[in-house]
Amino acid sequence: MTIHFHIPGQPVGKGRARIGKVGAHARIFTPAKTVSYESTVALFAAQAMAGRPLLTGPVNLQMRVDFAIPASWSMRKQRAAEAGLILPAVKPDADNVAKAICDAINGVVWKDDVQVVDLTVKKRYSVVPGVAVRIDELDAQ
């Protein structure tokens, strides 16, 4: 089985857990931006699943992370970025975006992200920012 979905908007990486104080007690919390993004990812993933059962075996996960081309760049530089001649070596890190998406779809697409055995993440510039996700269920061998 193959699952495809697209998360529109500027990609967000998994934020580090923070420690805050509530009275005399320390509390660990996930940044609000991460929680919001993971909720959005889960929504699009659930729509793509369309009620199908969770994937239970190993999977191949492919992501294309598209960043908005900065409007402040010259038209020449914008065209070069759109053509793939300039690559986005910018935050967030590819692995942090992958982590946010993997964690968001636990219990939505698969049981747990330990099922990801092959992972490809490509960062590019695009006129339309977002993350395209493709998940292929693999035959266990």
Image (cartoon, rainbow, N blue to C red):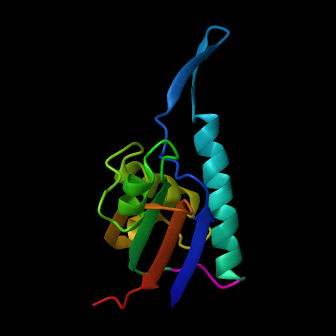
Give the x, y percent position of residue 35: 63, 44
Q: Nearer the viewer, residue 48 or 83?
A: 83
Write the residue at 35% across / 61% down: 80
Give the x, y percent position of residue 138: 38, 87
Residue sitting at the far top: 24
Instruction: Classify 22 as above or below 86.
Output: above
Q: Nearer the viewer, residue 97 or 109?
A: 97
Residue 52 visible: yes
Image quarter of the C terminus: bottom left
Magenta range is: 51-55
Give the x, y percent position of residue 121: 35, 65
Write the residue at 38% across / 79% down: 58
Instruction: Classify 17 as above or below 20.
Output: below
Write the residue at 47% across / 78% down: 135
Q: Nearer the viewer, residue 6 or 104?
A: 6
Residue 124 visible: no
In which image quadrant can residue 53 be found?
bottom right
